[in-house]
Image (cartoon, rainbow, N blue to C red):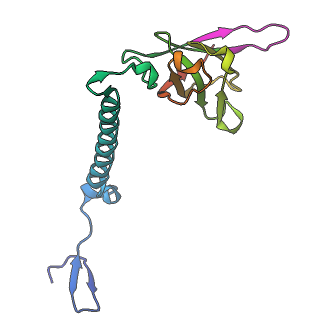
Amino acid sequence: MDGKLELICCSVEGEVRGYLPASAEMKGNLMDINVEQDALRDLAQRKQNLQLELKNYEENAKVGKVGGQEVDQSQMGVIPANTQLQTSLLVNPGSEQVQPHVELSISTTNDTIIRTVMIFAEGVFEGESHVVHPSQQSLKSSLQVPVFPPKDIPVDLHIKAFVGQKSRCVDKKCTHFHVFELTRQLPRYE
């Protein structure tokens, strides 16, 4: 009864509620009321993922010690902690047999091997992804992937690489790999 427009709702149980219109500064933000809840949910998910990762590391450390003795980590599929994945982009002018393209070079910083590389890029590959899976005999610590972008526009390349110990893949029973994930932008070439 103060002269303001108000929405009145009555429930089946007899509860009566009144709702005032949103103020001018709230206009456009009414749908973002749950931003804090979304942020908390995202942080809780990250916490859970980090706890699972920590538990995995702890279990690997337990397995790495048998009877108080250190076990050779290369036999467990563990790669050195300082292993990094490096990428570079090179323009290949092509030849009579191959059209011009960009070459994505992927390598590790030590003698680990790259078993598989998956590249996800919107509008670059048929089906939005490309997988390179070298044969067992040609596994090395570096890999070159030709990329033929259909348009001259910048594109994000989302790269996942499976990296493992060279000594574990000699017997053709490579089962333990570390997955490196990174994003590299394919710039516009002029």
**Residue at point 34% right, 56% down?**
28
**Relative to residue 162, is residue 138 depicted above or below?**
above
Give the residue furthest to the right: 96
Q: Nearer the viewer, residue 118 or 173?
A: 173
Q: Is residue 175 left or right of residue 35?
A: right
Q: Is residue 51 left or right of residue 161?
A: left
* Residue 11: percent from left, percent from top: 28, 88
Q: Quadrant of residue 56?
A: top left
* Residue 82: percent from left, percent from top: 37, 15
Q: Quadrant of residue 150?
A: top right
Tell how many labels. Answer: 0
Can you say which quadrant of the picture contains the C terminus? Answer: top right
Q: Which residues are magenta?
A: 89-102
**Residue at point 24% right, 62% down?**
23
Q: Nearer the viewer, residue 142 or 26?
A: 142
Give the residue furthest to the left: 2
Q: Nearer the viewer, residue 58 or 154?
A: 58
Q: Quadrant of residue 57?
A: top left
* Residue 89: percent from left, percent from top: 58, 13
**Residue at point 74% right, 13% down?**
100
* Residue 33: percent from left, percent from top: 28, 58
Can you say which quadrant of the picture contains the N terminus? Answer: bottom left
**Relative to residue 65, is residue 91 depicted above or below?**
above
Magenta-span inclusion, residue 112: no
